[in-house]
Amino acid sequence: MKILLADDEPLALVRLRTLLADLPGVEVVGEARDGEEAADLIEALRPDLALLDIRMPKQSGMSLARALSRDPEVEVIFVTAFDHFALQAFEVDAVDYLLKPVEIDRLATALDRARRRRSGDGQAPQLAVDGEAATEASGCIWAPHRDGLVRVPISTIDWIEASRDYVLLHTPTRSHIVRATMDSLAGQLGEGAMVRVSRSAFVRQTAVAQINRQGRTGSVVILKDGTAVRVGVTYARAVATIFRGLGGVSGRPGGEGDEGRA
């Protein structure tokens, strides 16, 4: 997969280049220091994927992504120090939204999602006919999309994480952001299929590959795509009971804190 990097911070480019050197099947074909240079290089080099900072001189990464959203041949992953652009990022159908400093496991997961999208794996989003309510009880959640709202079947969601006043719905090929709370979603997800593993995360039972111990009392759910989701200590006993057959589970609930994503 051919990748273009765009960031006005030289050290950020060095870090991304270093991380990508350790991942198989990728080639960095170009680097840009501002949005206009990134746009020119994308036109000239035709990468499969662009890793874009958001705040860049001349043209922002968000503005560039909006233009690229009309070109399905180039996928976009945002890499930024700011978390308050997440809603805009998923409205332009970005593959993922990574916060600096980027961890290699998180980057690898995002690249795998980009590959699946490019290969046509998984269903394309189904747009809403009208722009009414963000959620419904009949097995789906409506999420913002660049063309309005998109229908996200609950059966396609691998895991859900809280992000301030929003939740992120992660499917195998894309992520969606919805203004909601974890408690409000709990009643819509139904019993059994989605398991709450912390105050800030749900996982789909069938998406879980294993559960690993972390430290003396903690544990982490590992999804089939390699995503690691930390189990909150107050949820540990219930999670251990549900997934006992998978092995590698600590049945001890630990202390009084609670964690979200690993």
Image (cartoon, grey):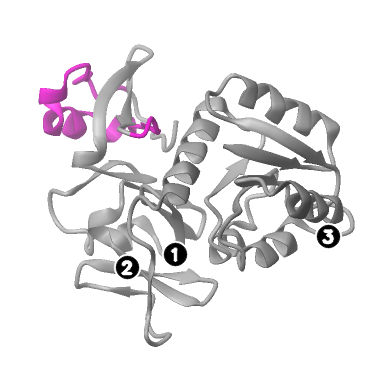
Q: Which mark is residue 178?
A: 1
Measure how far apart labels 1 and 2 are at the Cα level: 9 Å
The residue at 30%/61% (across/down) is 185
Disc 1 residue crowd, few under 14, some 14–19, many 20+, Cα 10 Å: many
Type of amino acid at the residue the image marks with label 3: Gln
Q: Secondary structure at mark 3?
A: loop
* Residues marked 1 and 3 touching at CB (< 8 Å): no
129 sits to left or right of 25? left
1 and 2 marks in contact (CB < 8 Å): yes
Sequence-wise, the earlier of marks 1 and 3 is 3
CA distance separating discs 2 and 3: 33 Å
Where residue 243 appears, as percent x and y from the top left, is 15, 30
Label 2 vs 3, first from the N-terminus: 3
- Which segment is the magenta one? 225-254
The answer to which of 31 and 159 lies nearer the viewer is 31
Question: As drawn, which residue projects farthest toward the right?
Answer: 58
Q: Which residue is mark 3?
A: 59
Q: Position of residue 85 (x, y in %)?
A: 64, 58
Q: Are circles 2 and 3 on residues that touch, CB within 8 Å?
A: no
Q: Give, as a three-letter code, the residue at label 1.
A: Val
